Image: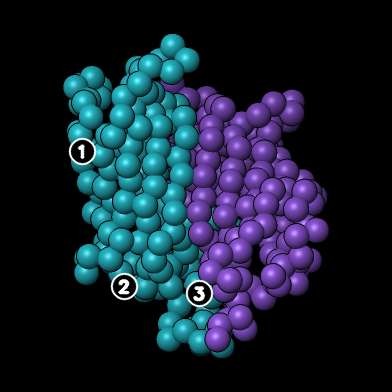
Chain colours: A cyan, B purple
Amino acid sequence: MNAVNAVVVGTELPALALPVISRGTLALFAGASGDSNPIHIDLDVARSAGLDDVFAQGMLSMAYLGRLLTNWVPQQQIRSYGVRFVAITPVLGQPTCTARVTAIEDVDGERRATLELAVKLADGTTTLTGDAVVALS
Amino acid sequence: MAIDTKHVGTSFEPVTMDIERGRLVAFARATGQVDPVYCDLDAARKAGHPDLPVPPSFLFAIELEVPDPFAWATRMDIDLNTVLHGEQRFDYHRMAYAGERLTASPRIDDIYSKHSGVLEFIVKRSAVTDEAGLPVADLTSIIVVRNPAVLP
């Protein structure tokens, strides 16, 4: 991959802009991910917990960020991947995933890049921050 | 502190999941993944994979593959409505593929509180292994429990 060969500290990965998250997406993700916590799909449960509405599973945004990573390198090059869920993603939120190279090091005989990750909503709210380490060769 | 720290070190029953192609295709659809490597067996094989790859965050699903995925919360006397997923981490040993039988072995590694007990944190680690018992990935979850009763 040419883009990966030219990587330096500061390189930004192509951002991944997602469509608006619908209630349908939350239901599909609940089934596919096995996360059956009803607070994400059942308005009655959300209200009984004092919320105005359901909100997106944090792991949905983590899956989106994972797509950004595997768009950039073959998945077998990902060594670690972690996120912090810093704000709730409301229904109809529209996330964009970004990543930037913050370090390049030789570890265990391979060249590895550390990436700083983020997911932001259209209104500017940061919902996830994180990091990943990927092998560059 | 509302959560008893005696739970630190507690291991939960390992959970085994048969990774099915159909489930991975459903996961791809639910996450808008259109890269054929993740939903088309021929494309996956052309890319050098033996079967459809398990995407980076899917391994989190293994532990949820039980009748009551939140039994750990009940066991620790935690109201699920006060729980938030604070952090999630994956350290990978190798790729996993459809057709494999994977096992997650969860354990409570730490419990601590911040802000005078308003927020409590549970660190749960799960080793994911294959049928030979060899490591596939290590998962770390930090679960945040809001404790409104402590608020002044």
Is tag 3's residue or tag 1's residue first in the polypeptide sequence?
Answer: 1
Query: Gap between marks 2 and 1, in whole Å?
Result: 27 Å
Is tag 2's residue or tag 3's residue first in the polypeptide sequence?
Answer: 3
Q: Amino acid at mark 1?
A: Glu
Query: Gap between marks 2 and 3, in whole Å?
Result: 13 Å
- In the rendered structure, the answer to whether residue A120 lies left or right of residue B41 reads left
- Tell me the residue that label 1 is attached to: A12
Chain label for disc 3: A
Chain label for disc 2: A
- Tell me the residue that label 3 is attached to: A41
Q: Is residue A63 visible?
A: no
In this rendered view, identify the residue nearer to me: B90 or B29.
B90
Label pair 2/3, CB-CB below 8 angstroms: no
Crowding around mark 2 (Cα neighbors within 10 Å: few <14, some 14 to 19, many 20+) is some
Mark 3 and mark 1, same subunit?
Answer: yes
Q: Under tag 2, what secondary structure?
A: loop
Q: Residue A2 location, x and y as percent?
A: 20, 21
Chain label for disc 1: A
Q: Amino acid at mark 2?
A: Leu
Mark 2 and mark 1, same subunit?
Answer: yes
Crowding around mark 1 (Cα neighbors within 10 Å: few <14, some 14 to 19, many 20+) is some
